[in-house]
Amino acid sequence: MAQSFQFGPLQATIAAGVKVGDRAPQFTAFEPTLAPFDFSTTAGRVRILNSVPSLDTGVCDTETRRFNHEAATVPGVEIYTISVDLPFAQGRWCGAAGIDKVKVLSDFNAVAFGQAYGTLMQEIRILSRATFVVDAAGIVVYAEYLPSAGQEPNYAAVLEAARTAAVAVAR
């Protein structure tokens, strides 16, 4: 089922996304160095996937900085922020913002992540704001799609889902 997403004065339609209990879709993207990133290489680890419209916006900046800060409180969890920003721009932004724990990925080329997770706003070719937690078995254990670009995710719920998944791995 498609849904509508408000981005400032623009409204776009995005495809149906993933839900809790689904197997996390595989995707490829690019690291800031332009090295290809294959999500399948992270199998066996707990991951937070944070989809944002652009690191160059206030809410996306705040969100990524917050996850970078919170990363220290969720040992054993990898955090990725994904946007369609160009890889080089992402690298510059991370350097200027002091982002050293969150890994940024660019979906600029094939928008494989946006299509697989239902965050691609086709009409304006950017990603909507959404956050997912994928457990070590590759199952989505948390999914939050935000209806407006100005909203931030429920950090407490995201981090709790990640901690719970990480504890299960440690057992």
Image: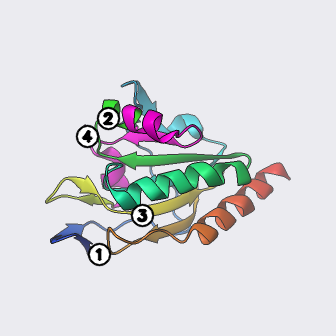
Q: Residue at x 45, y 51 (%)?
A: 25
The N terminus appears in which quarter of the rendering?
A: bottom left
Point out the stretch of residues depicted in magenta. Answer: 92-118
Residue 128, percent across and down?
32, 62
Q: Nearer the viewer, residue 36 or 51?
A: 51
Q: Which mark is residue 130?
A: 3
Label 4 to label 1: alpha-carbon separation: 22 Å
Q: Residue at x 82, y 50 (%)?
A: 170
Residue 141 in sight from this viewpoint: yes
* Label 2 residue SS: helix
* Label 3 residue SS: strand
Residue type highlighted by circle 1: Met
Q: Which residue is mark 1?
A: 1
Q: Nearer the viewer, mark 4 or mark 2?
A: 2
Label 1 to label 3: alpha-carbon separation: 16 Å
Q: Nearer the viewer, mark 4 or mark 1?
A: 4
Q: Which residue is mark 2?
A: 89
Residue type highlighted by circle 2: Ala
Q: Nearer the viewer, mark 1 or mark 3?
A: 3
Residue type highlighted by circle 4: Ala
Q: Nearer the viewer, residue 125 or 21?
A: 125
Residue type highlighted by circle 3: Ala
- First along the sequence among labels 2 and 3: 2
Q: Nearer the viewer, residue 99 or 140?
A: 99
Find out whether residue 63 is within the magenta segment. Answer: no
Q: Residue at x 42, y 53 (%)?
A: 61
Q: Is residue 91 above or below residue 158?
A: above
Q: Residues within 10 Å of mark 4 (few under 14, many from 20)?
A: few
Q: Residues within 10 Å of mark 1 (few under 14, many from 20)?
A: few
Residue 155, percent across and down?
58, 67
Q: Is residue 3 above or below residue 24?
A: below
Kindly give the residue lying farthest to the right in the view shown.
171
